[in-house]
């Protein structure tokens, strides 16, 4: 079907009352409950004789209808929709960037719908959303200024936002209207936000607006107003009191409460504050067991993704962990390093890896002292002899034995003299990171234990 044919069909559906037909013809069409141009044209073409109306009036009316169709068939769908509509247009095709034009739309709605209280309502809007350069004021402060209660200001704000929402999503207002393309865009934005869950980060919202909605607005306060109209409220800045350190978040206040979000976030923070890894499955199950309402899997993903202290280390299996710089103790950081390495490691190497991952200096004496002091008293760690290496107690296969004792054990097992390299090969089967130089040092410094048989072998 061609665009021109689509437009003609849309023109045919225009109410016939919008056409300047002879009065008698109008009255007759109304008596037959004929509402559209299409039905009126069909009726007049198939009814050559109408009581009280001469043939010339019928012919003239058909000409008027045909001319109207011909003259308007090339209009855009939105222009066709506006034919005969005397309501004030508060959002036109120039308002494609909703985030930038939302304040202008809001002012127009207030002016046309709340004209008796226009100044007061605009004053509330400006100061609640920091528009026109005003700072943000509380409901109570605005109430004091206007000599009304805090609750009254809340009611006025809520009614204003709801009215703007209804005008942008429906065509029910008798006083104002919005261009159909703007309405479709607003409804699509609402749907896309809902698909992200009840909680969404500010960064995700800006990304969505930039990619899909011609976002060029430099004033984030307008974005806040747009989101409030859509039913989203910004979480308080004091919300990042947990170890998650969340970015700016918005939540659907009609579907979830800030109190439930705080409960869920506090619980998630308590789960992942350790150096262990956690699957999204386990986090969701644990959260549901606490019966925290309306927190979905998507909401938990959004909470984790907006945290500057959490990272996803396996997207396929949905495994998360706390970033190393957010772990609360040096021992937790050392534990993470040893788990990742999977083998005993010298404490200096552990410190070096931590510094590298935290992008700090290559040598930190205080961190070295903290790690060694904490590992000594922490049951998760076990020293490997006096080598300066540490392993994890959960590694039952790693023997807690010094390099010297391993050398003695290797000689006893062999039952005959061995070369230094042979001893090294044998003991590194048990502790692979012992250097050959350490073996040579022990052979020289412990002549009372290791007796040299000839130039190369010892017993």
Image: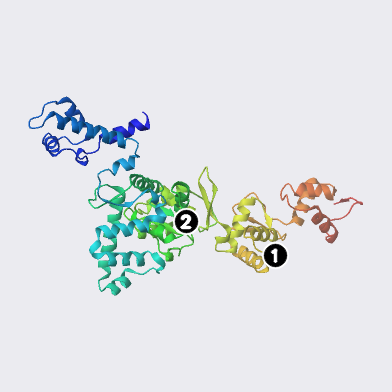
Q: Is residue 449 visible?
A: no
Q: Is residue 368 left or right of residue 96?
A: right
Mark closer to the observer (2, 1): 1
Q: Position of residue 126 (x, y in %)?
A: 35, 65
> Depth check: 15 or 254 in front?
15
- Residue 416 or 63: which is nearer the viewer? 63
- Residue 57 in view (yes/no): yes
Side (left or right) of 279 relative to 168: right
As displayed, is residue 146 above or below residue 281? below
Residue most extreme to the right: 455
Question: Residue 347's spot in the image, x, y percent?
Answer: 68, 60
Residue drawn at point x = 84 percent, y = 47 percent: 416
Q: Is residue 272 left or right of residue 198?
A: right
Determine the image quadrant of residue 231: bottom left
Q: How many numbered circles does the render carry?
A: 2
Looking at marks 2 and 1 on the same chain, the residue that comes earlier in the sequence is marked by: 2
Q: Residues within 10 Å of mark 1 (few under 14, many from 20)?
A: few
Which residue is disc 2 drawn over?
A: 271
The x, y position of residue 162, in whole percent, is 28, 56
Quote the CA–CA distance across marks 2 and 1.
31 Å
Mark identifier at residue 363: 1
Label 2, residues with CA under 10 Å away: few <14, some 14-19, many ≥20: some
Instruction: Return the x and y of residue 214 as percentages of the image width and height.
Output: 45, 49
Tag 2, which secondary structure?
helix
Q: How is the image coloured?
A: rainbow
């Amino acid at each position: 079907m061609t665009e021109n044919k689509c437009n003609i069909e849309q023109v045919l559906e225009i109410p016939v009352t919008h056409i300047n037909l002879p009065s008698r013809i109008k009255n007759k069409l109304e008596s037959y409950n004929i509402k559209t141009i299409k039905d009126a044209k069909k009726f007049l073409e198939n009814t050559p004789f109408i009581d009280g109306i001469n043939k010339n009036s019928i012919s003239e009316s058909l000409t008027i209808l045909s001319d109207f169709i011909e003259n308007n068939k090339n209009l855009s769908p939105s222009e066709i929709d506006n034919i005969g509509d005397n309501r004030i247009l508060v959002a036109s095709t120039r308002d494609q960037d909703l985030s930038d034009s939302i304040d202008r739309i809001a002012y127009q709605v207030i002016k046309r719908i709340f004209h008796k209280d226009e100044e007061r309502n605009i004053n509330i809007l400006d100061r609640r959303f920091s528009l026109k350069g005003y700072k943000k004021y509380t409901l109570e402060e605005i109430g004091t200024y206007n000599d009304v209660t805090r609750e009254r200001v809340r009611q006025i704000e809520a009614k204003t936002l709801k009215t703007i929402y209804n005008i942008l999503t429906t065509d029910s207002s008798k006083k104002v209207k919005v261009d159909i393309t703007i309405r479709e865009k607003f409804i699509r934005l609402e749907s896309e936000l809902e698909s992200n869950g009840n909680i969404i980060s500010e960064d995700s919202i800006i990304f969505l607006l930039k990619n899909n909605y011609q976002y060029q607005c430099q004033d984030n306060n307008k974005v806040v107003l747009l989101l409030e109209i859509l039913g989203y409220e910004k979480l308080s800045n004091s919300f990042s009191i947990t170890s998650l350190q969340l970015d700016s978040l918005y939540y659907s206040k009609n579907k979830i409460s800030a109190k439930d979000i705080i409960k869920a976030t506090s619980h998630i923070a308590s789960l992942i504050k350790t150096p262990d890894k956690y699957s999204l499955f386990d986090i969701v199950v644990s959260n549901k067991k606490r019966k925290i309402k309306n927190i979905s899997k998507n909401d938990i993903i959004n909470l984790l993704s907006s945290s500057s202290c959490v990272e996803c280390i396996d997207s396929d299996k949905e495994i998360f962990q706390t970033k190393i710089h957010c772990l609360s103790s040096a021992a937790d950081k050392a534990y993470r390093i040893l788990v990742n390495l999977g083998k005993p490691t010298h404490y200096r190497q552990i410190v070096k890896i931590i510094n590298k991952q935290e992008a700090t200096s290559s040598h930190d004496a205080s961190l070295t002292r903290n790690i060694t002091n904490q590992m000594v008293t922490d049951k998760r760690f076990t020293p490997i002899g006096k080598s300066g290496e540490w392993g994890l107690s959960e590694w039952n296969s790693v023997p807690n034995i010094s390099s010297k004792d391993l050398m003695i054990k290797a000689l006893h097992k062999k039952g005959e003299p061995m070369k230094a390299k042979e001893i090294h090969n044998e003991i590194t089967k048990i502790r692979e990171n012992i250097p050959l130089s350490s073996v040579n040092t022990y052979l020289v410094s412990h002549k009372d234990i290791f007796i040299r048989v000839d130039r190369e072998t010892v017993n």
